[in-house]
Image (spheres, grey):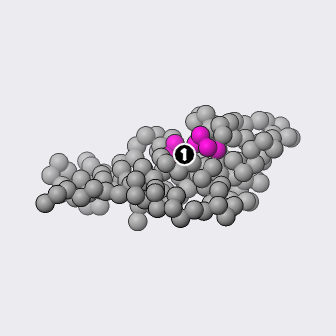
Amino acid sequence: MFRPHKRDQYALRAIFELAKRKGTGPTKISKIASAQRIPVRFLEVILSQLKGSGLVASKRGFYGGYALVRDPEEITVGDIFRFMRGEKNDVLCVAGDSDAHCPFYGNCALAPLWNQVQAAIYDIYDNTTIKDLMNNENGGTDQSVADELVNRATIDKPNG
């Protein structure tokens, strides 16, 4: 439930791979695609979009490819997802395709719940850096860190 769109996941995985290769020069799309199991055609489009984010840069030519511009500890998962979605992080209504088609628009008892869930998810995204993900891969997973992120994102229940 509330899994990011495939395109957002691919963007995150591409940034993750570039972070692992930071300092080694430009990385070819085929290497990123192979390492992260991303279809090359999708990756080409995603990396082209990510150039506009200031997170990645490209170099043309035989020795060209893509490289991460910022340090992995400065980039959050939330940064990537917000850029890919164009700041539109709406939770789509389960009764319709969009607010315009929702039969409960303006009078939905569930909307505050979905908004709280969305805020909690983005709190975790915003507090998780690419460096954190790299540490996870290297066996540096610390359950107390994961617990802290979940605790920060805990939804306060109203009294009553």
Q: Where in the figure is residue 148, as x and y percent of width and height?
A: 46, 57
The N terminus, quarter of image? bottom left
10 Å crowding of disc 1: few (<14), some (14-19), many (20+): many
* Residue at the image point whose x is 57% and y is 62% from the top: 142
* Residue 11 visible somewhere in the drawing: no
Q: Residue at x 27, y 49 (%)?
A: 99
Establish if 6 lies above or below 87.
below
Residue nearest the observer in this picture, 131 or 148? 148
Q: What kind of residue is marked 1? A: Thr
Q: Is residue 66 magenta?
A: no
The dominant secondary structure in magenta is: helix
User: Label 1's element?
Assistant: loop
Quadrant that contains the C terminus: bottom left
Residue at image point 86% right, 41% down: 62
Question: Quadrant of the rendered structure where residue 114 is?
Answer: bottom left
Which residue sits furthest right? 62
Q: Which residue is mark 1?
A: 76
Of the pair 39 and 158, the residue shown nearer to us: 158
Q: In this view of the protein, which residue sits in the foreground, 137 or 24?
A: 137
Range drawn in magenta: 72-80
Q: Would you say 36 lies left or right of 132 here? A: right
For residue 2, which quarter of the picture? bottom left
- Residue 52 x/y as whole percent: 59, 34
Task: Return the x and y of residue 87 as percentages of the image width and height.
Answer: 43, 40
Q: Is residue 76 magenta?
A: yes
**Residue 154 location (% of width, % of height):** 35, 57
- Is residue 135 visible in the rendered image? The answer is yes
Total numbered labels placed on residues in the image: 1
